[in-house]
Image (tube, grey):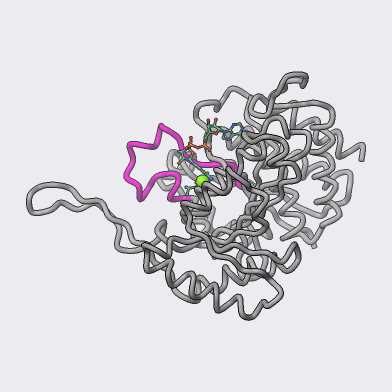
């Protein structure tokens, strides 16, 4: 039976970057026999404009019925004056929660062709391959109470709540441990256990889970040090596991080690392997509409979809090989451009990947 993929382009560069990824999926369907159907729906600012809400019920229903979801990005200055409860970003957080996508896998891999585009010296980053496992449906982005209240003296006070249950920590650490077992058996759990009780508990739970994985070398690191270590000596890390907000920040940081945030894909998975796939970046209002955004993070997210939700790991390898081939040809969007390479736009980069895929 054919698998249903729901495509949610979203806002800003979302539509531009999703186009190349959809072409890749269409090529796999037409030329390689991937049995899929694709559907499209609204999310984010586009949904707010059309339906008055960043996550319409129709989108939730389609996403729940789909075998996998491909998302571009949401948000932008047009919607910033809105109340947070109806901003585009709320649509993204909402769909993650609705689908129970608690495990966000963000691989930061340096393609050797881009060593010169990394912010770090080639010898510090060559061979870089880190998997950041970010908890995605809990923590401070979801904790209650939250809001802005007025104090008796008329001053305003903003507040959010960092909250995790033991069970939430347990399940995300187990996901990270299982990944570590398939890789190099090293896991670093990142917290702020010296200051935040919630992450003191996180550390305790991670340690308890670690006892079930005696082969994995578990270490703990405070998030401030982890940020510093990522840009000092990133290859000390193999798999990292952390909270929703820390993972959000650390993965943007790690992305630049690979040359650009436009290179990092992600998979957001539920308990059963159903997933949503998206680049880690946002809607990039500064380059939106210019046709210069890097589509590779989104195309690499398709590879993750093939691997994690569609059980087509050979096709995932093919997509990654095609991305490699486009880079081997010297093609570069501006974010990864360096002297001696050829600057191309979003569409040309996507088409080059499709051509390489077709030609094997
Ligand atoms: N997953 C999502 O949908 C996310 C949405 N956002 C939203 O996106 C909007 C913009 O947020 P920012 O903080 O500016 O983060 P951003 O990730 O959109 O952009 C940060 C910087 O990276 C560049 N960049 C991002 N993606 C790129 C790509 N594919 N190719 C080349 N350059 C790229 C941008 O041009 C910008 O200079 C906001 O409304 C924010 O809330 C932010 C992060 C994630
Ligand atoms: C709306 C934000 C939480 C999205 C984001 O920055 C991310 O998931 O990386
Ligand atoms: Mg982010």
User: How many discs appear?
Assistant: 0
Q: Position of residue 233 (x, y in %)?
A: 63, 46
Residue 334 screen position, x and y as percent: 65, 24
Residue 212 appearing in the image: yes
Along the viewing direction, whichever of 226 and 92 lies nearer the viewer: 226
Magenta segment: does it hold 87? yes
On the image, the x and y values in percent for residue 302 come to: 72, 48
Seen in the picture, residue 351 relative to 73 is either above or below; the reply is above
Residue in the foreground of this view, choosing between 100 and 226: 226
Rendered image quadrant of residue 161: bottom left
Q: Nearer the viewer, residue 266 or 86?
A: 266
Q: Is residue 53 left or right of residue 144?
A: right
Q: Is residue 349 above or below residue 139?
A: above
Residue 315 magenta-drawn?
A: no
Q: Where 348 sits versus 92, above or below?
A: above
Question: Nearest the camera: 314 or 158?
Answer: 158
- Quarter of the image holding residue 16? top right
Identify which residue is drawn at 61% across, 75% down: 210
Tell me if 251 is positioned left or right of 202 in this view.
Answer: right
At 59% from the left and 56% from the top, the residue drawn is 62
Q: Can the viewer see residue 69 in this picture?
A: no
Query: Residue at left 40%, top 63%?
Result: 194
Which of the image's four quarters has the C terminus?
Answer: top right
Specify the quadrant that holds the N terminus: bottom right
Q: Is residue 211 left or right of residue 328?
A: left
- Can you give x and y, in whole percent of width and height, for residue 221 in the image? 52, 60
Task: Give, as a single range, the part of the protein colored magenta.
Answer: 70-91
């Amino acid at each position: 039976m054919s698998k249903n993929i729901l495509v949610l382009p979203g806002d800003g560069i979302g539509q531009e970057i999703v186009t190349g990824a959809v072409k890749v999926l269409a090529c796999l369907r037409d030329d390689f026999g991937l049995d899929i159907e694709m559907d499209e729906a609204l999310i984010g600012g586009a949904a707010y404009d059309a339906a008055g809400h960043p996550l319409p019920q129709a989108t939730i229903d389609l996403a729940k019925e789909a075998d996998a979801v491909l998302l571009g990005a949401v948000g932008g200055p047009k919607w910033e004056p809105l109340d947070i409860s109806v901003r585009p970003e709320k649509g993204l957080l909402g769909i993650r929660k609705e689908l129970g996508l608690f495990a966000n896998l963000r691989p930061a891999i340096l393609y050797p062709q881009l060593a010169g585009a990394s912010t770090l010296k080639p010898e510090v980053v060559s061979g870089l391959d880190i998997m950041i496992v970010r908890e995605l449906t809990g923590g401070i982005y979801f904790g209650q109470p939250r809001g802005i209240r007025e104090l008796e003296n008329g001053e305003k006070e903003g507040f959010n709540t960092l909250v995790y249950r033991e069970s939430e920590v347990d399940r995300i650490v187990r996901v990270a441990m299982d990944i570590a077992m398939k890789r190099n058996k090293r896991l670093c759990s990142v917290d702020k256990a010296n200051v935040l009780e919630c992450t003191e508990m996180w550390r305790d739970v991670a340690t308890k889970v670690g006892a079930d994985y005696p082969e994995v070398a578990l270490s703990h690191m405070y998030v401030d040090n982890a940020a510093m270590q990522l840009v000092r000596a990133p290859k000390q890390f193999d798999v990292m596991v952390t909270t929703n907000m820390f993972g959000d920040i650390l993965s943007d940081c790690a992305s630049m080690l690979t040359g650009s945030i436009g290179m990092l894909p992600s998979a957001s998975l539920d308990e059963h392997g159903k997933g949503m796939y998206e680049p880690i970046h946002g809607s990039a209002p500064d380059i939106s509409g210019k046709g210069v955004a890097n589509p590779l993070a989104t195309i690499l997210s398709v590879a993750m979809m093939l691997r994690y939700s569609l059980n087509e790991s050979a096709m995932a390898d093919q997509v990654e090989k095609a991305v490699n081939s486009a880079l081997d040809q010297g093609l570069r969007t501006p974010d990864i451009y360096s002297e001696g390479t050829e600057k191309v736009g979003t569409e040309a980069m996507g088409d080059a990947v499709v051509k390489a895929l077709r030609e094997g």
